Amino acid sequence: MTTTPSPKRAGAGFAAPGTQTYEREQNGRFAEKLHGESSVVLTGNMEMLGSRLASYAEEKRDEAVAAGRAATDARVSLAARSIREADPDIATVYLSPKDPLGGALVIDVMDADGKQLSPQKRVAAQDALRRAEVPYDPRFYYGGIDVDRMSQWIPDDFNPDLDREDESQKGARRALVAMNAAKLDSIDPETRVADMLADMRHYANKYGVNFDNAIERSEGYFEEDRNS
């Protein structure tokens, strides 16, 4: 008599394609068995995809460089504030990249008249930079750190006293954040505003918003904010 083998059940050492099961080994333990997953297939113009990926990589690299510089400026600002509070005589701090601890090595400190200050003041400046974790940055190699200027440095997209902002200040800050996020090509303020308004027109057109009505309403909001 001929018998037909019974179907094997998934979970007992067998599985449908694209799944993960456990099978018993000779020592009685169960081991993971990874089965082949279906691969992702890209469709479309591969040359265009490659070009877009390359552009994306360049954009992200530029963003990373800009973010790194902004982070360094923030740390330098912290150090400069500490230096100014501890020793107002120090006006400029000159750096070298040869810090054995990996940061920025102070090689000289000068007063406002360009006079070299004592080694003790140089050590104080070095301590301030290390506490703020300032890395070496070639931008500060030749001209040094202008302590007064950097102690007052604030990023364009940052407000240290948000609780005291009135509505006009909040609106201007939000607009600046939006323009920075949009990465507009122009640095001219009027052109940047015009670019943002053009983008708003495109948005309104795409989503069926009456742009003229929005502009009219914005005038009322603007007056309310100015009088708040």
Image: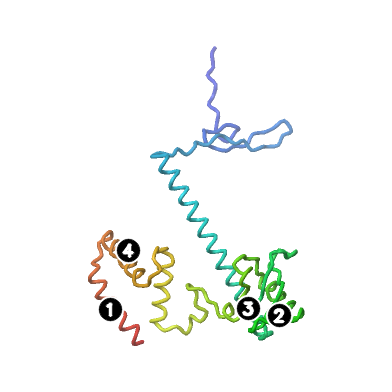
Gap in angstroms between the C-alphas marked 2 and 3: 18 Å
Number of other residues with Cα within 10 Å of mark 2, as a class: few under 14, some 14 to 19, many 20 or more: some
- The label number, if any, that marks residue 80 in the structure image: 3
Identify the residue position indicated by label 1 in the image: 219
Look at label 3 and name its amino acid: Ala
Query: Going 65% across and 66% down the picture, which residue do you hit?
Result: 135
Gap in angstroms between the C-alphas marked 4 and 2: 53 Å
Identify the residue position indicated by label 4 in the image: 199
In percent of width and height, residue 101 lies at 74, 65
Look at label 1 and name its amino acid: Glu
Secondary structure under the numbered disc 1 in the rendered image: helix
Earlier residue among tags 4 and 1: 4
Q: Nearer the viewer, mark 4 or mark 2?
A: 2
Q: Nearer the viewer, mark 4 or mark 1?
A: 4
Q: Residue furthest top?
A: 1
Q: Decide which of 90, 18 is in the foreground and name it.
A: 90
Residues at circles 3 and 4 in contact by the CB criterion of under 8 Å? no
Earlier residue among tags 1 and 3: 3
Gap in angstroms between the C-alphas marked 3 and 4: 39 Å
In percent of width and height, residue 105 lies at 71, 69
Residues at circles 4 and 2 in contact by the CB criterion of under 8 Å? no
- Please tell me whether residue 51 is drawn above or below residue 132 in the rendered image: above
Gap in angstroms between the C-alphas marked 1 and 3: 42 Å
Q: Nearer the viewer, mark 2 or mark 3?
A: 2
Residues at circles 4 and 1 in contact by the CB criterion of under 8 Å? no
Earlier residue among tags 2 and 1: 2
Earlier residue among tags 3 and 4: 3
Earlier residue among tags 4 and 2: 2
Gap in angstroms between the C-alphas marked 2 and 1: 56 Å
Q: Nearer the viewer, mark 1 or mark 3?
A: 3
Identify the residue position indicated by label 2 in the image: 116
Gap in angstroms between the C-alphas marked 4 and 1: 18 Å
